[in-house]
Image (tube, rainbow, N blue to C red):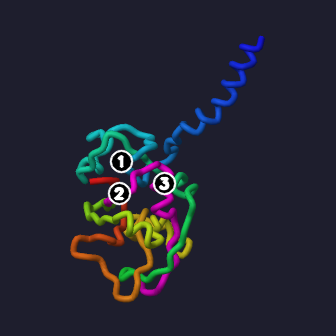
Amino acid sequence: MMRVLAAVFIALLSLPALAADETREPDGMVLLTVGGLVGQPNRGPIDAKRDSLLAQLKADFKYGFAFDRAMLLELPQGSVTAQPAEFDKPAVFSGPLLRDLLISIEAAKVKTSLVAADGYTGYLMPEDMDGSDWILALSADGEPLGIGQQGPIWLINTRGEGETVGEDRRGSHVWAVVYMHVGE
């Protein structure tokens, strides 16, 4: 009897650990895929047919994490007030904080590249992410960012007076982000 009770007790203690290991998969349309050094993946390698845009963008990974809009909205949200060149006046951009998104999938803290739907790329180093509130903006002034409006995801933060993007596109405000690669 004691062995049965001990086995039941151990099984009950294991349930939370097993539940924590379950990784959520997207229910809706995937807006963002993260590949590379991802410790908690929810998808396998790139499939050139199913992932034709990612293949065209030369994304390559063995494991990745796919986010739909609902999953992105479940992450800790932040906001940034900025006036990018594409806007006539300052706007409040909101969406998940980049560093929290990376923590949620146990991504390595290394160089992270961001790739737009048109192939434009930018990157951030760990010190860039730690030094500023980078937002994966899903909306501006409460309105969702759509395709053609720098969306559905726009990497943005506030920039100091006179701060610009380097020629190497480090710290670029990449819009229409569809893929992020963690690591080289």
Task: Give the magenta part as a residue range.
Answer: 87-113
**Can residue 162 be found in the magenta stretch?**
no
- Identified by mark 2, the residue type is Val
Q: Residue at x 51, y 62 (%)?
A: 96
Q: What is the number of the mark on residue 103?
A: 3
Residue located beneath label 2 in the image: 110
Q: Nearer the viewer, residue 84 or 78?
A: 78
**Secondary structure at numbered mark 1:** loop
Lower sequence index among marks 2 and 1: 1
- Identified by mark 1, the residue type is Leu
Q: CA distance from mark 3 to mark 2?
A: 12 Å
- Classify residue 116 as left or right of residue 83: left
**Secondary structure at numbered mark 3:** helix
Q: Give the crowd class for mark 2: few <14, some 14-19, many >=20 residues within 10 Å.
A: some
Q: What is the number of the mark on residue 68?
A: none
Q: Residue at x 34, y 88 (%)?
A: 162
**How far from the left and from the top, in percent, is residue 73?**
55, 58
Instruction: Tell me the quarter of the image containing the C terminus.
Output: bottom left
Q: Residue at x 32, y 62 (%)?
A: 116
Going by the picture, which residue comes out furthest to the top? 1
- Classify residue 69 as left or right of residue 9: left
Residue located beneath label 1 in the image: 37
Quarter-wise, where is residue 86 in the image? bottom left
Lower sequence index among marks 1 and 3: 1
**Can residue 96 be found in the magenta stretch?**
yes
With respect to residue 91, does 70 lie above or below? Answer: above
Q: CA distance from mark 2 to mark 1?
A: 9 Å
